[in-house]
Image (spheres, coloured by chain):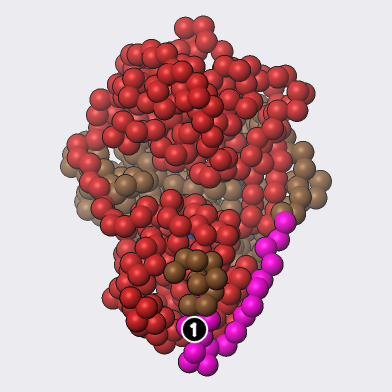
Chain colours: A red, B brown
Amino acid sequence: MTLNNVWVFAQATNGVATTATLELVTKARLLASNVSVFVSGDGAAIAAAVGDFGATKVYGADCGAHLPGVAMAAAMKSVIDGGESPDLIMFPQSYEGRDAMARLSVKLDKTVITNNVDIEDSGNGVTVTTPIFGGNTLVATTFTGSGPFLAAFRPKSFAPEASGGAAAAVTAVVVPDLGAAGSAKVTAVHVEETTGPKLDEANVVVSGGRGLGEADKYAMIEELAKLLKAAPGASRAIVDAGWVPYSYQVGQTGKVVKPTVYIAAGISGATQHMVGMKGSKNIIAINKDKEAPIFGIADLGIVGDVHKVLPKLIEALKARG
Amino acid sequence: MNIIVCVKQIPDPAAPGALNSESHTLKRDGKLVIDDSDMYGVEMALQLVDAAGGGEVSLVSMAPNGETSGMRTALAMGAAKGVLVSDPALQGSDALTTAKILAAAVQRLGGADLIIAATESSDGYTGTVPEQMAEVLGLPSVTFTKKITINGSTLQASRQTEAGYDEVTCALPAVISVTAGVVEPRYPSFKGIMAAKSKPVEQVTASDLGVTPVGWDGAGQKIISVTQAEARQAGEIIEDDGEAFNKIVGFLENLKVI
Ligand SMILES: Cc1cc2nc3c(=O)[nH]c(=O)nc-3n(C[C@H](O)[C@H](O)[C@H](O)COP(=O)(O)OP(=O)(O)OC[C@H]3O[C@@H](n4cnc5c(N)ncnc54)[C@H](O)[C@@H]3O)c2cc1C
Ligand SMILES: Cc1cc2nc3c(=O)[nH]c(=O)nc-3n(C[C@H](O)[C@H](O)[C@H](O)COP(=O)(O)OP(=O)(O)OC[C@H]3O[C@@H](n4cnc5c(N)ncnc54)[C@H](O)[C@@H]3O)c2cc1C
């Protein structure tokens, strides 16, 4: 089949479409002539932005205090029941994306394929690519049967490129009655503020891991990050240990980063960490174990103690002013 | 308070993963162990039942070859009983089919006040099964839960978000998925391990549960190729002699980052 009608599950923060959304809209436009996006909240807020990247329609659904996943899936199903027939629905590999996709897959009785980094429509099949085993192996999977095909993509899988399209036409969708499934409600929202550049957009990322030894030592990472105008990051080991908030995590279940320079200090290089950072242009690793897997992908590897190397590096950078 | 925990039994994560060259599915012929990610759910369930002052923790699992060793670990921690769905016909099942099977196993146990799963498994990490299961059962769900308390028939949870966390309330019965590290899973005691051996695990097939089609037929997807990605080459590795920091400074200068 050839894709004709592609939907994108969009996300916006404070009325601004996320980069992941624009990445997916760009790819959707290259796959099909009709691209519509679905967003929780007012579609008008992002109509110009997604239009600029190639969407012609935006459906906005007011989810109220509902968790967006369950409400958006119901809203999307109602538009399909109303006669629209998407061939493919693209989701970002995010919390809301995953929830909405999972709920919709049951409503439509369609399979989901997640963690993808690419998609191709060969004319006789739609194939997605998923990296496994830390990205060393690529699996190509084709959807069988009829659409809509449901696929989720990791951030930074596609480069966002504007096409100069007009603002997308806005349609408001009413979220149908969710019954018992709708009883989960958000009562308060907490934002864990980070200062400096955003982890997934920074040009330089400095991450620390369990090799730092204790929570206090993460201050070295923050100081180094500040000197390099970098974003501080972390392995899951120290997020789970409560040293830093989850929003710092790099990896399979955290952020995907592709900075010019990635510095990994006291991080072993587990496959789940590497899938989140191996797309970095340059990787510097500091680890006291010369067998650490991280050295296998480092452009510059320092076999040494972070407690010795980092303070000297910080001093040297400070001395440069 | 009765809680059902989904327990996935997976190949030992310490052994490098491998795909079956013909079916392209993950090799699962060795002994399977409980997925670490599910230990948090088991621990959380035991604590919640304790706090409620009564009830029990049951398990559901889908695994090949009548495998129960991972379930026994959870039984040794304190779970009371379980249902194992094991059936050659299930080979090749996708996440949606898995969710339908687990939902049917939950119903076979008579349902529960709360159903707990991990946010994603360590081996397949599709990350959709808990929410799909909730939809199949017509229940509300709170995914990515970090903390949970229960008051009567309502749960209060902190739910991780990209920016921080949300506070969420939800009526029971409900499905939740829990993130790693939320509680400290207990070690099974010797007494627990001995007791686990005689705790009941009912083994059923997909057709016992009335779920069709399953396996490859139900999957809606087909792996067509498996290739090696272009490997990233290692660069220069040096031992720190006290001056290695200079190397880093030089490297950053070259890239005009400083
Ligand atoms: C590398 C890889 C990638 C895959 N990608 C996809 C894909 O994109 N789409 C797809 O449909 N299938 C996929 N599969 C197949 C998938 O692993 C199976 O469908 C599996 O039965 C359920 O998926 P999961 O473990 O990935 O689920 P997840 O959604 O990651 O599981 C979340 C949680 O649900 C519970 N759970 C899941 N399975 C079981 C079980 N058998 N018994 C008890 N509890 C369980 C556990 O608590 C688990 O932590 C993939 C398999 C592999 C090996
Ligand atoms: C489903 C799943 C998803 C996951 N998702 C992620 C993810 O998104 N991100 C992630 O990071 N992990 C993830 N993990 C966890 C991952 O498998 C590893 O456990 C984790 O990345 C290890 O973190 P670490 O490198 O900090 O710790 P460790 O593996 O303990 O490594 C610490 C390193 O520090 C070195 N070291 C010790 N002392 C010093 C010193 N003084 N100086 C220099 N070096 C020192 C050691 O040699 C060692 O190599 C996931 C796991 C699973 C199962």
- Looking at the image, which residue is at 55% across and 71% down? B254
From where the camera sits, is residue A293 visible? no
- The span shown in magenta is B230-248
Q: Nearer the viewer, residue A262 or B37?
A: A262
Asked if A56 appears above or below B222 in the picture, the reply is above
From where the camera sits, is residue A126 visible? yes
Asked if B180 appears above or below B153 in the picture, the reply is below
Left or right: where does residue B67 sit relative to residue A46?
right
- Report the amino acid beneath label 1: Asn
Asked if A34 appears above or below A18 in the picture, the reply is above
Residue A250 at x, y percent in the picture = 46, 58
Q: Quadrant of residue A239?
A: bottom left
| Chain of the residue that carries numbered disc 1 in the rendered image | B
Q: Nearer the viewer, residue B1 or B177?
A: B177
Disc 1 packing (10 Å; few <14; some 14–19; many ≥20): some
Asked if A64 appears above or below A84 in the picture, the reply is below
Q: Residue furthest right?
A: B22
Q: Is the residue indicated by label 1 positioned so its CB lies within 8 Å of ligand 2?
A: no
Q: Nearer the viewer, residue A172 or A283?
A: A283
